[in-house]
Image (tube, rainbow, N blue to C red):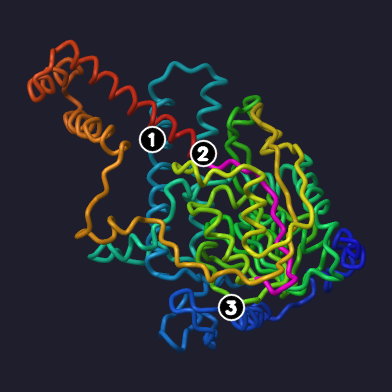
Amino acid sequence: METASAAVVGDGSDANQRGDLTDARPADRYADAISVLCSKLACPACGSAKLTASESVDAIHCADCSNDYPVFRCGDDYLPWLFPEPTNARLEWKARYNGYLTANAAEQRRLKSTLQLAPLTETGERRIDSLLRAREQHRDQIVSLLAPLDLEGIDWPSGTADLLRAKLPKNQGLSSYTSNIFRDWAWENGENEALIDAADKVLGADQREHVGEMLTLGAGACRLPYDLHRRYAPTTSVMLDFNPLLLQVASTVVRGQILPLYEFPVAPMNESSFAVLQECRAPTPLPEDNIVFVLADALHLPFTDSSFDTIFTPWLIDIIPQNLRDFIPNINRCLAVDGVWLNSGSLAFFHSDASWCYSEEEVLEQVEAGGFEVLSVERRTVPYLKSPQSSHGRTEAIFSFCAKKVSEAERPQSFVYVPEWILDTSRTVPASDDTLVSSSQHLLVAQVLSAVDGKRTIDEIGRLVAGQYGLDVDESIHAVRRILLDAWEKSDEERSADSL
């Protein structure tokens, strides 16, 4: 920003601090923030702007469609749950929560079995025992963090079609991006400084005197929007993500609590690195009531038109399960004219449709076609998720831009992750090369896995399959071995992913 220096507050230790944390703060401080937030909200289901918080601040009510959106109390703070179908979204997260609990229990059983049966040295036994205790405590930490959402207290519906409308991408689980928690609040390895510096660089082209009302989409564990809040002192910061674990951690830490949480490094450097009890903390706590955390889907933004002056998308635009071309109108709709869209992160698109996997040049073309003028662009290489406790780490070439809204875009269409032919069982299932290639494989895999009963050998399963398909026995045994090897490797990969 040419005038950014007027907006920059420095390290947040002066203008952004509103009193010592030891000062008494009224319990309803953040309740007032929810009431202010309601003035920006549009009902995620019907689009109405007639939303109000209940007197007890446990729900936000839509006067037009009568939907109630829960607001969860987290310490002194409040987290509104603003998904289009709030109950179904909670059920989706309940499934992911149960998946975490199941995986954690399986890992504990594996470690106990190792202690009992494996030939271990004294050092090895100490390592496994430490890992086991860490997994037990980690479970308690996660359960405690998510307790305010009462995921265990909601029941599954009898039907599934409505539930599928709230379906989240499979790769966005409860444990997704947990390494980011430690990067944001524990490691102090220079990554956060590199990322905020990249954002600063492109914001230098912003000619406004103030960033105004700021919304961060895909805020994650919130370190980047936290740093932007401290540096540019927005009127309000709304930090939105759909992962409740990440936002729970963020709201806890940003408000000044020290959060103990176990890190399980990808490639531990020594015995003490296999399970590390980290203390997640903010460099400077921010008790301000102009910071609001919102649980919602960036593809279904629950805000009125032109409700923000600045929108920030960190590490987001390449991982959304929607064509970027169709996502940009959501950004445009929520920004005021002359408002700024700040983006920073990778461009690692992995869509099955190659036309959605844009180049850097195409991204800028789509941004300009969506009603924006690109003010500045930068590419730089930064360290990425390099835990001090792990020998694993990488660098990432990130793409940042600052773009000003110059015109309105066409109204965005509602997005549903699951295709209509799955939601409506009377519709024709489209044929595709991928489906045709994998259908016979899936059938064979299902039959092989269903034959595993803890008693049969691979030879016996192979002969069983050979009889069903009229195959050569040796060929069938080879196929069974291959399928079981793939299943074993997949389970091993999942255990490794759960440790992140």
Q: Residues within 10 Å of mark 1 (few under 14, many from 20)?
A: few
Discs 1, 2 touching: Cβ within 8 Å: no
Labelled disc at residue 109: 1
Q: Name the one closer to the observer, 62 or 92.
A: 62
**Secondary structure, magenta segment, majority class:** strand
Indicate the quadrant containing the N terminus: top left, top right, bottom left or bottom right.
bottom right
| Location of residue 182 (image quadrant) | top right
x then y, percent, for residue 262: 59, 43
| Residue 349 located within the stretch drawn in magenta | yes
The residue to which callout 2 is attached is: 133
Decide which of tag 2 and tag 3 comes sooner along the chain.
Answer: 2
Is 29 on the left-hand or right-hand side of 22? left
| Amino acid beneath label 2 | Arg
| Amino acid beneath label 1 | Arg
x then y, percent, for residue 345: 67, 47
x then y, percent, for residue 454: 20, 27
Decide which of tag 1 and tag 2 comes sooner along the chain.
Answer: 1
Rendered view: 325 above or below 212: above
The residue located at (65%, 65%) in the rendering is 371
The residue to which callout 3 is attached is: 304
Q: Residues within 10 Å of mark 2 (few under 14, many from 20)?
A: few
What is the magenta range? 335-350
x then y, percent, for residue 15: 88, 70
Q: Secondary structure at mark 2?
A: helix
| Residue 151 located within the stretch drawn in magenta | no
Q: CA distance from mark 1 to mark 3?
A: 49 Å
Q: Secondary structure at mark 3?
A: loop
Discs 1, 3 touching: Cβ within 8 Å: no
Name the residue furthest top.
Answer: 474
Q: Name the one closer to the observer, 280 or 160.
A: 160
Q: CA distance from mark 2 to mark 3?
A: 48 Å
